[in-house]
Image (spheres, rainbow, N blue to C red):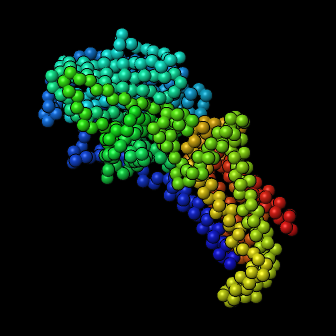
Amino acid sequence: MEQRRLLIAVALSFLVFFLWQTLFVDTDSLKKNEPSVQTENQVKKVMPLIDDKELTMPATVPSEAVPQPSIPLIERSKTVTVKTPLYEVEISESGALLKSFVLKKYREAVESDSDLKELIAEDNPFGSVGLTFSGSSLQALDRVVYKTQNDLESLEITNASQPVSFYWNSPQGITVEKRFIFNPDTYRVELAIIIQNGSSQSLQGNIALSLNGRVDDKSSRYGFVGPSGMINNKIDRVKLKKLKDKNVFPGEISWIAMQDRYFMSSIIADQPVEGEMKLLIREDNWLQNELIHPGVVIGPGSQEQFNYQLFFGPKSMDVLKPIGHGIDKVINFGMFDILAKPCLWLMNKLYGIIPNYGIAIIILTVFTKIILWPLGSKSYKSMNDMKKLQPLMTGIREKYKDDKKRMNEEMMGLYKIYKINPMGGCLPMIVQIPVFFALYRMLYEAIELRHAPFLGWINDLSAPDRLFHFGFSIPFMEPPYGIPVLTIIMGGTMFLQQKMTPTPGDPTQAKMMMLMPLFFTFIFINFSSGLVLYWLVNNILSISQQHYISRKYA
């Protein structure tokens, strides 16, 4: 029976490690220089953002014979800057593309003098929110040079929402307008695509809006990072390694997005579009995510308007929920999401009372412990009873050391006489595993903890704790390199808790059990300090509860 307890304890420990590796570590990182995704046996050729060229469009022709436009050099485009209290965005007249989107309330790093958070990389050659009308003579609308009203160059929005429109006129009398409406109190930007056909022929094709983002070779080890979309009222999160198998996702498209650990960019259809989400790997590992509205027909002398919303901002439940369209579902904490989201809600409520997320985590841990208190008390009582039986169990082992079957029978009889469940001591660990993983994902991905200080050297609860920063690497430790003080203290509390636990009679088994705290300390060394803080406080509370139960039933 002692061997069974040992095996269960070891198995649970390795279960934690295995689930962590399986659920949160993506070992199949995207290989560098991976070939572009192929569709219909053709590799789609793409061109970078052109800042100093304009397209002259040919006469409108039937969609069955669309000629490729020429690209003569005409004039240099300028950039329009729009400032609101929340962000500053730069839009190039070339393609009316977003070239920069800077969030004013977030920084790139934890340092107070760090640059503000940029959502469109400076080296992005494609920009974002590109417009194409494939299958028509207007297919390259992301490469033409638009003009703004009154030659606008800068606009500051502080009170009411204001529109900024970009116009392009073709020689055949077709007018294309990209109208952005910026609001001072939200990250949501309204976008209208208005196409007026002043030519003598119909325009037919597929309207597409696209987002572009860098494909990271290392990919995210935790959670999900990459392209996603809500299709048929269900979120599709596409791992980059799966793009070779499938890159077109048809259905009723509500929105598409590019997301990382804490931020996202998204194009939202005002009304769900029966179309496609299409993903393409462009040169230098840039990824394009397209929302395609197929089968558009604009007759001669008529006008069509297509309404969307853009979201460039933080993955915060409080920010995303008011936008609607199910965009808040992009926040997902994995298989234990049903436990993680209430914990996030409670943590934020606690922060509203005490503005320190470290203290909020401590109080959240106390609440969790109170809920699990009855189970813990029952388990610790069982462990305390086991400790009292140690002399009798040792005698049985000595007496029947050469007859394992008889020894186990006598052990079971002993448990039955004293009404003890030898597995009872494992119950707290089993119950805590879902809570642990739910809190792990929540504490890792919750933007509220990004750059959130606690005390002393812990100035970012979303990052591993490091006292001092060394100029050299340490095996098995992720940068920055330093002393993981909180993790070491946590390991010490686990060691103390293990000392309070009844030990197996076999000295070899006892030594193995004492290695458990070292094992856990090792796997926690790169966990976020917020999670380590939770585990440390939980250990302290468990030690207190175990001590109380031991004295009560002494």
- The answer to whether residue 258 is above or below residue 399 is above
- Figure disc tally: 0
Q: Is residue 37 above or below residue 86?
A: below
Q: Position of residue 322 (x, y in %)?
A: 52, 34
Q: Residue at x 56, y 27 (%)?
A: 105
Quadrant for the C terminus, please.
Answer: bottom right
Q: Quadrant of residue 325?
A: top left
Which quadrant of the rendered structure holds the N terminus?
A: bottom right
Horizontal relation, residue 167 to residue 60: left or right: right
Q: Residue at left 74%, top 58%?
A: 373
Does residue 292 lie above or below 370 as drawn? above
Q: Quadrant of residue 290?
A: top left
In the rendering, at what x and y percent does residue 264 appear?
Answer: 47, 36
Query: Does the image show residue 165?
Result: yes
Q: Residue furthest top?
A: 150
Please provide percent x and percent y for residue 365.
Answer: 70, 49
Of 248 and 126, the residue lying toward us: 248
In the picture, measured across the screen, residue 208 lies left or right of residue 219, that is: left
Q: Is residue 401 positioned above or below 387 on the image?
A: below
- Position of 519 with respect to 171 (left or right) is right
Q: Residue at x 80, y 56 (%)?
A: 544
Nearer to us in this view, 71 or 189: 189
Residue 75 rendering spot, x and y as whole percentages: 26, 15
